Image (cartoon, coloured by chain):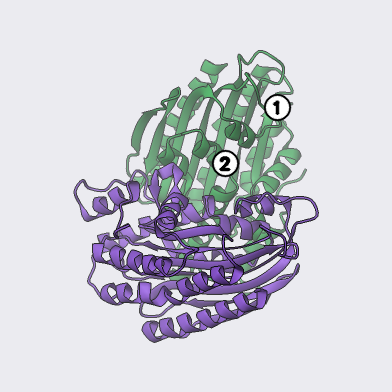
Chain colours: A green, B purple
Amino acid sequence: MRQKMSDMVHRIQDEICFALKEIDGVDFRQDEWTREEGGGGRSRVFSGGKVFEKAGVNVSVVHGTLSPQAAKSMGGGHELKGTDLDFFATGISLVLHPLNPMAPTVHANYRYFERGEGQKPGSWWFGGGADLTPSYLFEEDAVHFHQVHKDVCVRHKVADYEKFKNWCDDYFFIKHREERRGLGGIFFDDINGASRDECFDFVTDCAESFLESYLPILNRRKDLQYSDQQKEWQQIRRGRYVEFNLVYDRGTTFGLTTNGRIESILMSLPLTSRWEYCHEVESGSEEDRLVQLLRNPINWVEK
Amino acid sequence: MRQKMSDMVHRIQDEICFALKEIDGVDFRQDEWTREEGGGGRSRVFSGGKVFEKAGVNVSVVHGTLSPQAAKSMGGGHELKGTDLDFFATGISLVLHPLNPMAPTVHANYRYFERGEGQKPGSWWFGGGADLTPSYLFEEDAVHFHQVHKDVCVRHKVADYEKFKNWCDDYFFIKHREERRGLGGIFFDDINGASRDECFDFVTDCAESFLESYLPILNRRKDLQYSDQQKEWQQIRRGRYVEFNLVYDRGTTFGLTTNGRIESILMSLPLTSRWEYCHEVESGSEEDRLVQLLRNPINWVEK
């Protein structure tokens, strides 16, 4: 499974990057890196193109021994301790920040994790998800993104769209703002309720559906006109993105405490962001409409 | 002491804001706020003026019961638990981010803390410090800033400049970047080694010396010419400022977990910041000269 998952994420990275290159008009920068404690990764980042302010698609295959701190932030319902701290992890992680404030930021991440030899019950699991973070609300975009992910879930008995949708809303909660980072999608961790192959098939289907979930949205929004005020609002929302990632995100915490490659971990941060003191949205405005949904998530597709 | 310290920080807030208003050419926005669990504060923020991109000077007087999480992040060498989690805290906190990349960001914070009734040994302490965060190095600025703070320390037997200077270098360390946030200054916590009045006199002297430590530097740099590239470097350094504050700063963590006023806590964040993937400074450049000092702090004044 280690090899199978690693092959899959590399193949998906190629597919996604090829599609993004077509749209953005520039090639990505690639960095292959190794980690002193074991393993490494391949980071690809777009910048300076027509469509993306900054976009990164990263795969990694790492192994080593977890620090107690990393074991804690790892989560997944497992309290790791003692001699069973050896781990293996491989996954794909991407964050795309478009230039146009009408085009949403998107994030997806699919990963496989083993501790010890990965043979004992509960010693392996899959995790991942995908979520959409617009600055302006287009309902049809949210519906499309959720529908594609629901369709994937329906095809696999290990998956439960409703549960994963709620999990996503809970996970991407910026507690001190009392709002979510975006309009959600799916999120799951600790998937090991079926055979390893069944779980792998689900995660593969998710990863293969990424372009279908996002490209139609991007194509509809990337060339829309916008004002300076709208760009500023996007920058404020990107500030919130930074707040979530640095304060709450487990992947970021895990990376910062396991001596990961910092530039790959913080690749998720936007190129630029903004913090205005006491910024308030006008009641009834487009900005307000979005914020209401970040505070009170709704169902975008039928359960 | 509760009243005395609270009066002092309000007086200093007035003095500093009056001086900043003269320089910036605009008035501050003031917000008085109260905290549901007890107490409140007075926040003053400058924006849209000639000199500061964003500048905040905040005082607060709060009391309540610490959550176990807040008690932990509070630090100060005290493990707080059980029924002794009642607290009182008052202080002044300021962060000034100038527009001009040649003018350094500055931060200062002086606070008094009591737990329980504040009568038992070790149940009260003072903390604080001030540190300078330039994007470009002017040695005379760093020397001046450190000299003023050293002179204050020399006047008080509770203070030890060398110890507080090293404490500052240690505290403002961005571990995942292996560099400090800035060129330091002084930092101290848990000051209670002498009488309460002696500690108060030291902290008051620090707060009263703030303008002397910073204004000459600001006046020398605020109107210097700069290029777009230099502004961009400032924005990248401000990204690092955000990383420190959101990932490591105890004051921020404390605020986010004690239901503090979010806009006052995050007032320390710059208006705008930037994260470039794999940004590297040119060897031997001005940017490189600064980074070397962030990696390997030096003594700016004689010990």
Task: Name the one closer to the observer, A91 or A275.
Answer: A275
Task: Characterize the local packing of mark 2: few (<14), some (14-19) or many (20 or more) Cα atoms within 10 angstroms.
Answer: many
The residue under label 2 is which amino acid type? Ser
SS at mark 1? loop
Q: Position of residue B102 (x, y in %)?
A: 28, 67
Amino acid on which disc 1 is placed: His
Which residue was labeled with disc 2?
Answer: A213
Q: Secondary structure at mark 2?
A: helix
B22 or A43: nearer the viewer: B22
Crowding at label 1, few (<14), some or many (≥20) Cα neighbours within 10 Å?
some
Instruction: Please tell me in which quadrant of the rendered image residue B146 appears.
Output: bottom left
> What's the chain of the residue with tag 1?
A
**Image quadrant in which the N terminus of chain A is located:** top right
Q: Is residue B297 left or right of residue B269?
A: left
Identify the residue under disc 1: A156
Counting every numbered tag in the picture gives 2
Q: Is residue B226 above or below residue A239?
A: below
Q: What residue do we see at 43% from left, 60% from top?
A: B186
Quick check: A24 left or right of A108?
A: left
Residue A209 visible in image: no
